[in-house]
Amino acid sequence: MHNTSLQFKKQVTIKLADVRLQDALSRLQSRFVGGRAAVISEIHDLQETRTAAAAIRDRVLNNLEHWLLHFEQQATARGAIVHWAETGDDVNRIVTEIAAQHNVKTAAKSKSMVSEECGLNDALEQAGISVMETDLGEYILQLAHEAPSHIVAPVVHKNKEEIADLFAEKHNKPRKTDIAELCREAREVLRPAFLNADMGISGANFLIAETGSALIVTNEGNGRLVTTLPRVHVAITGIEKVVPTLEDVTTLLRLLPRSATGQSITNYVSVLTGTKKPEDHDGPEHFHIILLDNGRSKLVGSEMQEMLRCIRCGACMNHCPVYQNIGGHAYGWVYPGPMGSILTPMLSGIEKSPDLPNASTFCGACAVVCPVKIPLPDLLRRLREKQMQLGMKSRQETFMLRVWTWLALHPKFYALGNKIGVRILQLMGGKDKLIHRLPGAGGWTNGRDFPAPAGKTFRELYQQRKQS
Amino acid sequence: MSARENILERIRKAQASATATPSATLLSHLAQHPRGPLPPQPENLLQCFKERALKLSSDIVETADIQEVPALLAAYLIERILPVQGVCWPVLENLPWPQAGLEIQSRPAKNQDMVGITGAFCAIAETGTLMMLSGPETPATTSLLPETHVAILDPARIVATMEDAWELLRKEHKHPPRAVNFISGPSRTADIEQTVTLGAHGPYRVLLILAPPLNT
């Protein structure tokens, strides 16, 4: 997928003014944030489970080569073919080759964010293979030629009226606005796509080293259909998704759907191992698993390694005040919200997304809800430090930070500057103690007033109390 | 060098530090496959399973006699004005379907089949979930393509957690089959306005019939 995160600030301005988007985002907040809160307490000891989940992910990441090789060996022994891809383009090439090898004309696809990284659909279409997205949200986006705006609920930015218009136009059927009727219409349009597809393409939420299996969680059943009916199945996922045992993956499954959609478990959890046996009636004859790096291995062993624990639940974005106000498209690439503000610069280059590490209030909600305890604000801070070291900050920001550094190292001047500054701001605040315009801080005062300091400075109060 | 070697080489170089665990420890983790934190053991597995399954919009009927299953299913279908034709797993083909007015064929499901009748490998009380193993006698399409999925479940095969289900699989099978499918109620989607709608691409309804096993 093309990365447009250089235009972050411009996109934010547009998104903030988009009334329909704001309406959709408020819905996401109530359903997903409320939904998670309602079921996360079902977990007997949540903190202990989160700690265990983080330890499971760390065990893998600290010994990633070992677990990848073990997975490859087991998967191969069960009849799957494991491919390794350095970049998204490599994935596209491998899938195209597999398609050519098996004479594939049509493919049905279940939701895969990794395939969005690669821009797989465009590459397959160019190779003359027709691809049908089958996750309802992804299908709607394919019809509308749009990108997902959320990793779990990809079409969260559209309301049902827009979807009704789209279906009426593309399906050539009378317009429906009842959500259940829209879903049935999509089911009826998509069922033949499953039955006729030569190849099924899916992601994998986890790879299990013990058994060489790919695990997929879905609610709609499309994940089961694309991995059961077509004669070829290709699963694409990141190298970090491997987990040692069935027990380990079970601990993660207690957290994933609860954190993502507020479900105790998704409707379907499919553990796929090897190919159809001669006596079987269903299942793919060929099972290919593609392991994508695309920058992930750079994080291994680095101060950013904790990011690779991520199990893609989306809780961090659901709870993020920035995401809640701007939605996913503004971030400019596949992964939005706090996890995206780290992954996008790390995977596609810090110079291509200079604003993302700064798109955070550091409120810390993401770290509190993360099921695998990724210290997201700490990682964002490390990226900001890196930007500073690389000289990526604006001259104004660098100057301000230099001034602040000097003041912080000279307490007497700091106190004096503080005292004067507070008095000036108090004067500017006037009777209602609100500053409407502040030179150099237009970004703040364009949208809201800046509260003027209310009384004395901390140092003055401290001195006063010490004396009394 | 191939992509595989490049990727593994980068990882190896980055991890030459102290964080790597000796491979004996890693292999013993595989061999022992320790469990993570577990929920408290429910007092009554059957009761817990039923409560959770109902919460996930599954329907439940119970009988002490498996020969009663066709009549119970017929009543369920007729009450909802649903077709009485369907398919079942081979192991269930000799139940008295015709006597209950049902036309049930023993074969894997096709697109047009409206009712799919299966057994289950076991069920999980913690989440109200069925565990299905694919195989020649247990085709996966039967629980997937029809609009109504009927699963006949032996209450003695309800275990507390998914960990217990894996243990049962390890005990009874050498390897996992091609597909292990955990099913928790009818298929659903909330992609449009985060409004839950039952019956996305899989079944619209799941009927669980709790009955003792067939004497085979």
Image (cartoon, coloured by chain):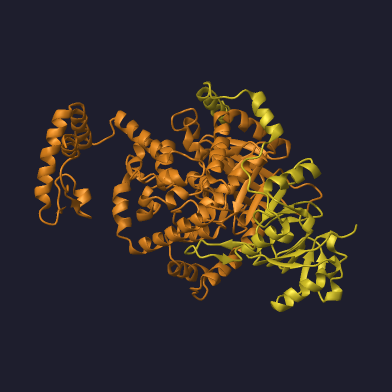
Residue A23 position by quadrant:
bottom left
In front: B185, or A156? B185
| Residue A63 locus on image (x, y percent) | 58, 28
Residue B120 higher or lower than A274, as above or below: below
Residue positioned 53% across, 27% down in the render: B11
Instruction: Give me the chain that's yellow.
Output: B
Residue A140 higher or lower than B27, as above or below: below
Tell whether A421 sits left or right of A317. left
Residue positioned 66% across, 67% down in the render: B205
Q: Is residue A93 visible?
A: no
Q: Quadrant of the C terminus of chain B?
A: bottom right
Residue A3 higher or lower than B10, as above or below: below
Q: Outermost residue, right direction?
A: B216
Tell whether A17 sits left or right of A211. left
In front: B63, or A393? B63
Instruction: Give me the chain that's orange.
Output: A
In front: B183, or A422? A422
Count all numbered tags in the image, as a single digit. Answer: 0
| Residue A399 locus on image (x, y percent) | 19, 33
| Residue A207 locus on image (x, y percent) | 62, 40
Residue A72 position by quadrant:
top right
Residue positioned 66% across, 39% down in the render: B35
Q: Quadrant of the N terminus of chain B?
A: top right
Tell whether B35 sits left or right of A39. right
Q: Is residue A178 visible?
A: yes
| Residue A146 locus on image (x, y percent) | 44, 56
